[in-house]
Amino acid sequence: MRWQRLLSTIAVAGLLAGTSGWMQSPKGGGGKLKVYFVDVEGGQATLFVTPAGQALLIDTGWAGNDGRDADRIVAAAKDAGIKKIDYVLITHYHDDHVGGVPQLLDRMPVGAFIDHGPNREEGGAAEKNYATYEKTLAAAKAKRIRAKPGDVLPIVGMKATVVSADGKLIESALEGGGEANQYCKDTETRPADPTENARSVGVAITFGKLKVLDLGDLTWAKEMELMCPVNRLGKVDVYIVSHHGWNQSSSPALVQAIKARVAIMDNGAKKGGSPSVIETVQRALGLETLWQLHFSEESGEDDNTADEYIANLERPGDGNFIELVGSGDGSFDVENSRTGRVKHYGPSSQATSH
Ligand SMILES: [Zn+2]
C-alpha cells in the first residue's frame, strides 16, 4: 500500500507539471480523495485531502498531553504531502473538538476556521474553550467563516454541504434525499439537548459519487428533526459515527435511513463505542463494515467489531489511524494503519439510485 501510494504520488506530480485544472473534477482526473481518521483518544480529528491538494480538517482533538493530538494531525498531513491546512472546521466548543486549536496553530498554518458562531452553552468548560478559541484566532489573525445550513464550503476538489449548524438544519433535502423515512415510527423520541452538541456543524461531503456524512456530536432529538418525517440526507456510502459512538446519538431514524456501506467510529477505549450504537450500526441494512479507532471497553468482546477493523486494541493506544482513499466512481479503500491491511469497497450504486 505504501509503495503504491508513492507511485501514485509520482504520477500526480507528473500530471501537475503538465496540466492545470484537471484535478477539479474527480471524474476527469482520476485523482483520489484521502480521509485520515486521526486517533485523538475519543475526540474528533478527521482530515480530508482532495486531489487538488486542499485540506479540510474537521476538529482538532484535545488540548494538553504535550500536543499529542496536534502531533498526530501533523503526521497525517505529512503522509498526505501537505504543509498547510486550508480549512479547519470546528463542529462545536467541547474540549475534544476545539481543544487542540492552539497546539495545531503552533505546528501548522491554517487558511481559515469554520464554525457555527458563538458558543451557546452556559457555564462549564464550553465558555472557557470558546474564549481560548477566540483569543487564539485573534492572536494568529486567522480568518473565520461562519457556517450556515445550506452553505457549500469553499474547499476545492470535493463538495461539502453544511446540513446543520447552531441548532439549525437544512430546510430542503439534499440531492438523493427527500423520501419519507420509514424508520421514524420505531425510533423513540428524546428531549431536546441544551448543550453545544446539538449545535454541531454537520456536513455531507460528496466526491463524485462517493458520499460521506459527518454530523460531529449532533444528538438524538436533532437527528430526528433532520430525518423525520422526511429523510433530508438520502443515502451515504460512509457514515462517520456521530459523537464517537456514544448512545446520546445515532438514532435508528438516522442510522437506518442513510444506509451507509461503511461506518467509521472515532471512539476512545473508554469514550463512546456504546453497545447499543454498535448494534444499531451493525444491524443497519446495507452496512458492510464497522471500523473503530479503538476497542471499546464498555462493549467488550461481544459487541466490538472484529479486531481487524479496530485501529487500536490496547489502552493507551499507539495512535494508529484509519485511512480512506476514495474515487469519483464511489469506490474506496479503507486501511487500518495498525495492520497495514486494506479492504476494498466497489463503486457506489447509491448516488444514482434516486
Ligand atoms: Zn465529542
Image (cartoon, helix red, strand yellow):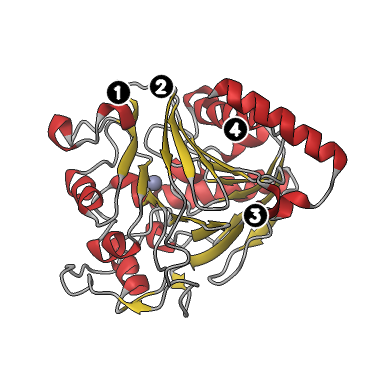
Mark 1–mark 2 CB contact (< 8 Å):
yes
Q: Which mark is residue 338?
A: 2
Look at discs 1 and 2 and give the one toward the viewer. Answer: 2
| Disc ID at residue 103 | 4
Which type of secondary structure does the marked residue at label 4 adopt? Answer: helix
Q: Marks 1 and 3: which is nearer the front? A: 3
Above or below, comparing residue 228 to residue 26 in the picture = below
349 or 149: nearer the viewer: 349
Residue occupied by mark 1: 313
From the image, state whether disc 4 or disc 1 is nearer to you. 1
Mark 4 or mark 2: whose residue is earlier in sequence: 4
Q: Amino acid at mark 2?
A: Arg
Helix or strand or loop: what does disc 1 sit on? loop
Q: Earlier in the sequence, mark 1 or mark 2?
A: 1
Q: Secondary structure at mark 2?
A: loop
Question: Around disc 4, counting alpha carbons within 10 Å, would you say few (fewer than 14), some (14 to 19), or many (20 or more)?
Answer: many
Q: Position of residue 346 (x, y in %)?
A: 44, 46
Q: Residues within 10 Å of mark 1 (few under 14, many from 20)?
A: many
Foreground tag (4 vs 2): 2
| Mark number displayed over residue 27 | 3
Q: Residue at x 43, y 48 (%)?
A: 94
Q: For the residue labelled by badge 3, is the local secondary structure a helix, a strand or a loop?
A: helix
For label 4, being within 8 Å of ligand 1 is answered: no
Instruction: State yes or no: discs 3 and 4 in contact (Cβ < 8 Å).
Output: no
Q: Position of residue 40 (x, y in %)?
A: 44, 33
Marks 3,2: beta carbons within 8 A:
no
